[in-house]
Image (spheres, rainbow, N blue to C red):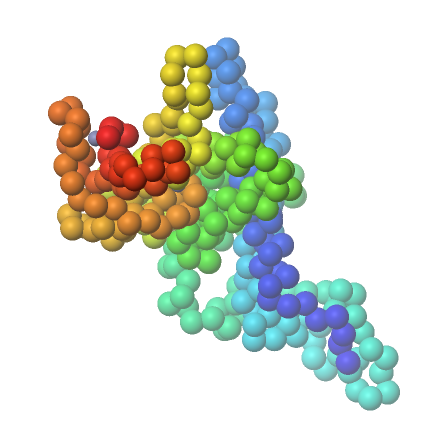
């Protein structure tokens, strides 16, 4: 018997870790840009980060394909000819990890044998080919073409969306923070967590643009964006110049239509009800309000405008 067979979830989780790690490495370098050091110079110096990220993306893609194959049978991953399998009664047991597994072309064909091809985005093959060829160049030391950080970010996002569906990228890169042990402590850490998520969205939006980013979310990020009452309240800070609130808007009507009365926030991933009422602020054309409930407010009902935070 072949023992210690892997399961689909283990492959999937480790693949997601590879992709998340690749993403984190790129974002980490981009966060080091200063007024003096340009992004171009920074990435010339940090090409190694992009090369290792590409290797991780390759590992991630293969892991996700193996995960699908495992749902049919992990035995399909074995490279050994079946007539050579030591599985007859007189043979000793073998461990899966001691055996060679398939890769490259065989892996790709076995993957498509195990999955309805309609479930995989048609562009996936192009992404896999680009990653495979460039990864081969890196591991075989052939050619040192400079790699652009934005192209690595796009490969990571596309891999998530093509193989795991919309929202999977955001769920992976945000859940790592929700599970961070630092968030089990005090309120300050919760604010820290939300500001990290805001920064991640602003970062992706800045370099890739909202149209590109929108491909990876089921919410329509190109529709009008609103302030999330929960994120805005939890991130507000009392300073000497008054209360400071983030003006980053990542909440969207869901569904997005003129009568819609529900909204979803990408940052805190909360769904909440709203009313459609015009804002009293003459400079604001907003018509979406939220009922603020607060012990300090007592019986007073405060309808806050989610466009300008006026009430
Ligand atoms: Zn929120
Ligand atoms: Zn307003």
Name the foreground residue: 132 vs 235: 235
Q: In which quarter of the image is the N terminus?
A: bottom right
Q: In this view, does 200 lie to the left or right of 65?
A: left
Residue 38 visible somewhere in the drawing: yes
Question: Image height check: is 189 above or below 125?
Answer: above
Residue 54 in the image, given as x and y percentages of width and height: 56, 42
Q: Which residue is pictured at 44% across the width and 20% down the height?
A: 238
Is 131 located above or below residue 232 in the figure?
below
Q: Nearest the camera: 248 or 68?
A: 248
The quadrant holding residue 24 is: top right
Which residue is found at the position 82% from the left and 88% from the top? 89
Image coordinates of residue 216 in percent, x first then y, are: 38, 48
Q: Residue at coordinates 56% horizontally, 75% vertically from top-left?
A: 72
Asked whether residue 20 is in view, the answer is no
- 183 left or right of 39? right
Question: Residue 203: horizontal and vertical position, in percent?
Answer: 43, 31
Report the residue at 38% width, 26% height from top.
245
- Number of labels in the image equals 0
Residue at the outermost front position: 299
> Residue 4, relative to residue 300: is it above or below?
below
Give residue 93's position: percent from left, percent from top. Answer: 82, 77
- In the figure, is residue 192 to the left or right of 289? right
Picture quadrant of ligand 2: top left
The quadrant where residue 284 appears = top left
The image quadrant where one finds the C terminus is top left
**Side (left or right) of 197 relative to 18:** left
């Amino acid at each position: 018997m072949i023992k210690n067979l892997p399961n689909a979830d283990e492959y999937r989780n480790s693949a997601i870790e590879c992709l998340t790690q690749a993403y984190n490495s790129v974002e980490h370098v981009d966060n080091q840009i200063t007024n003096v050091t340009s992004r171009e110079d920074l990435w010339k110096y940090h090409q190694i980060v992009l090369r290792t990220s590409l290797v991780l993306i390759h590992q991630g893609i293969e892991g996700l394909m193996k995960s699908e194959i495992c749902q049919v049978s992990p035995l399909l991953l074995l490279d050994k000819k079946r007539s050579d399998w030591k599985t007859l009664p007189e043979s000793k047991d073998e461990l899966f990890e001691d055996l060679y597994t398939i890769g490259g072309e065989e892996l790709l064909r076995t993957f498509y044998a195990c999955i309805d091809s309609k479930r995989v985005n048609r562009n996936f093959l192009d992404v896999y080919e680009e990653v495979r060829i460039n990864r081969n160049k890196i591991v075989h030391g052939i050619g040192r073409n400079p790699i652009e950080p934005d192209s690595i970010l796009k490969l990571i996002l596309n891999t998530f969306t093509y193989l795991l569906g919309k929202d999977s990228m955001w769920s992976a890169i945000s859940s790592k923070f929700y599970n961070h042990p630092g968030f089990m402590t005090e309120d300050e850490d919760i604010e820290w967590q939300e500001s990290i998520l805001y920064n991640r969205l602003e970062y992706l939006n800045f370099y890739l643009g909202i149209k590109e980013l929108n491909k990876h979310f089921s919410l329509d990020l190109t529709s009008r964006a609103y302030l999330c009452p929960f994120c805005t309240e939890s991130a507000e800070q009392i300073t000497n110049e008054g209360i400071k609130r983030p003006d980053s808007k990542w909440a969207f009507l869901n569904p997005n239509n003129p009568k819609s009365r529900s909204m979803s926030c990408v940052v805190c991933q909360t769904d909440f009800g709203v009313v459609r009422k015009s804002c009293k602020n003459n400079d604001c054309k907003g018509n979406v309000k939220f009922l603020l409930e607060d012990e300090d407010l007592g019986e007073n009902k405060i309808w806050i405008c989610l466009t300008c935070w006026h009430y």
